[in-house]
Amino acid sequence: MNKVKIIGTGSYLPENIVKNDDLAKIVDTDDEWIRTRTGIRERRISEGENTSEIATKAAIRAIKAANISVDEIDFIIVATSTPDNFLPSTACMIQDNIKALNATCFDISAACSGFIYALDIGTQFIRSGRADTILIIGAEILSKILDWKDRSTCILFGDGAAAAVLKKSETEGIFATYTGSDGRLGDALECSAIPVNNPYVKRKAEKAKAVVKMDGKEIFRFAVKIMEKSIKKLLKDSGYSADDIKGIIPHQANFRIIEAASKRLNINLDKFYVNLDKYGNTSAASIGIALDEAVRNDIFKRGDKVLLVGFGGGLTYGGALIEV
Ligand code: UT7
């Protein structure tokens, strides 16, 4: 089985900063509530850029950091819940933008666990010998599926994109991956698409409202439990202990979720990398943005072992133990 390494990362966030006080002008909320309940201070909200555009910018940065030619890319895997279109896939649009014409391209849907799922899928393609070089991307313009009248959701999310290049390697860089799903809890976080509407439908089509609806408490409980389970599983499968790990990059949803998981695992909170105060929850992009930021700011250096752990709509979950 081939060994796999992440050889470059990149991210991109829209320039427009929306602070908690700005949201207080739109919905009945305030900075103090948002900060104390979530840890979020501000987020980036697109002024028109769509998912494929921000994903392309993140991809170009990752390709540059990896120092590869676009012709080397065998697969482009994009995790997103907010594609530009049903067709073509966001991955195919990015392929055209960067001219990575040797790649097979497809999107996956795993909500906030998308970056982890893409990392796992890409890793397996390289392990099996099917591919040498894979571009994975998590990208979301969540702002287009938010109900901007619903204060319980619109304050949580932000737009952003992250990418990483995976490559066949002489030394191991992915020590364990783990994924799972629980479709029974799907309605805890949902956003409908379009209903069936054709000349043959027997029931009258309901008008779709493509906005996020969420049972925040259900997701909170699930997140804390599954973060604990995923981290324990990754440590066990890899044979490493928490002391061998330089840091943990959790999905950036809510600081209180991270705090609760840290307590349950008895792992110091300082080990958890947090940037949700600046970007909010960017769903499939969040772990990748944090990874890129931490690597570029030398918080994690070459050779450090880092745990990635995520959860999201579906419900979905998973993680990876990697070397940066
Ligand atoms: O990627 C996964 C995405 N989802 C998540 O990570 C969500 C996980 N869940 C959470 O982060 C939390 O459950 C929330 C931050 C969404 C909510 O926090 P909470 O402590 O569970 O608050 P709550 O829903 O129990 O609401 C408490 C009160 C309610 O008022 P009443 O009924 O007590 O009068 C809400 O109406 O806070 C009210 N509230 C707000 N007040 C001011 C809800 N949203 C807001 C708001 N500003 N934005």
Image (cartoon, grey):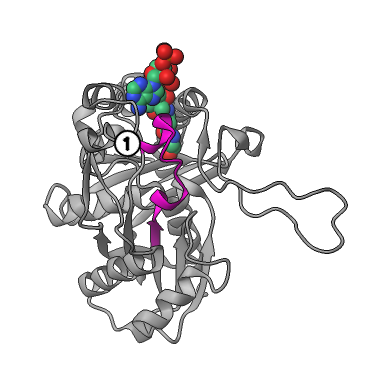
Q: Quadrant of residue 191?
A: top right
Residue at horizontal 52%, vertical 28%? Answer: 215
Q: Does the magenta segment cover residue 154?
A: yes
Q: Residue at x 45, y 30 (%)?
A: 223
Q: Is residue 126 in sight in this rendering?
A: no
Residue at point 31%, 26% (across, down): 29
Q: Position of residue 97 (x, y in %)?
A: 37, 80
Give the image quadrant in which the ligand numbered 1 is located. Answer: top left
Q: Is residue 64 visible?
A: yes
Q: Is residue 277 left or right of residue 320?
A: left
In the image, is residue 312 above or below residue 201?
A: above
Query: Dot 1 lies on which element?
Result: loop
Q: The disc labelled 1 sits on which kind of residue?
A: Ile
Left or right of 299? Residue 237 is right
Q: Residue furthest front?
A: 25
Residue nearer the viewer, 269 or 55:
55
- Residue toward you, 132 or 18: 18
The answer to if 51 sits in the magenta stretch is: no
Badge 1 is on which residue? Answer: 26
What percent of the width, then of the height, locates residue 232? 42, 32
Give residue 317's position: percent from left, percent from top.
49, 41
Q: Which residues are magenta?
A: 137-156
Q: Is residue 312 above or below residue 285?
A: above
Q: Specify few, some or many for label 1: CA neighbours under 10 Å numbering under 14, 14-19, or 20 or more.
A: few
Residue at coordinates 23% horizontally, 56% vertically from top-left? 292
Q: Position of residue 85 (x, y in %)?
A: 53, 67
Nearest to the observer: residue 286 or residue 303? 286
Residue at the outermost left position: 298
Seen in the picture, residue 267 relative to 78 is either above or below; the reply is above
